[in-house]
Amino acid sequence: SQKIEQNSEALNIQEGKTATLTCNYTNYSPAYLQWYRQDPGRGPVFLLLIRENEKEKRKERLKVTFDTTLKQSLFHITASQPADSATYLCALFTGGGNKLTFGTGTQLKVEL
Amino acid sequence: GAVVSQHPSWVICKSGTSVKIECRSLDFQATTMFWYRQFPKQSLMLMATSNEGSKATYEQGVEKDKFLINHASLTLSTLTVTSAHPEDSSFYICLLDGTGNNEQFFGPGTRLTVL
């Protein structure tokens, strides 16, 4: 069956450290993968898109990797801040028509 | 990014009533709009895909007669929850897709509570 899995447990890290979140998928062959941030009671906010032929993408303190052999994406936040605390969702383009399928999300808490 | 609004942002209604949720793009023309719902502490689940001027395509397990979708224009889509019941209480979010440029934008969501 098709699955998109993210760490179900919350990730707690200290301010200033690098947070690494994982997204694993099975039985998909996505052309693109996206990462979103979601705050409680709000819609997701787009962060980064990475294509299947790209290994790595960066944007300010964010870095995403995409390994189509391992079927895994890693999302890194360097020099983390309490304001980075949120739930982070990975999403794959699956099927036709740019349909996005989401992982379960990982809650990140950055502590002082 | 595009500015997307949803109205209402939250609604409380009695069981058996119908609720209409609007998703509007203020500066972006969306050929395709997706409707998702999200139950507490769960991920977003796609309900249906709609293209402007044509009927929506519903995901397996989503009743098309209960969740009516109208994609009236490139800037407006509506989702009507008919005869709502408490189990329909959820967070409903629209996602707008542009014309093949991989740009997609979420609305802020609508919290529906059915008593």
Image (spheres, coloured by chain):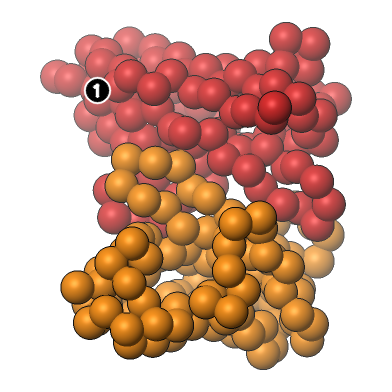
Chain colours: A red, B orange
Q: Quadrant of the N terminus of chain B?
A: bottom right
Q: Quadrant of the C terminus of chain B?
A: bottom left
In the image, A80 versus B46, the foreground residue is B46
Amino acid under label 1?
Val
Q: Label 1's element?
A: strand
Left or right, B29 with respect to B5, comes to right
Evaluate whether residue A75 shows in this view. Answer: no
User: Residue placed at 32% from the left, 84% from the top?
Assistant: B16
Question: On the image, numbered disc 1 is attached to which residue?
Answer: A110
In the image, B85 versus B11, the foreground residue is B85
- The location of residue A72, given as percent across then percent down, is 66, 16
In the image, A30 versus A15, the foreground residue is A30
User: Residue placed at 14% from the left, 19% from the top?
Assistant: A112
Left or right, B58 with respect to B16, comes to right
Left or right, B27 with respect to A43, comes to right
Q: Residues within 10 Å of mark 1 (few under 14, many from 20)?
A: many
- The location of residue A87, given as percent across then percent down, is 36, 35
- The location of residue A98, given as percent across then percent down, is 76, 53
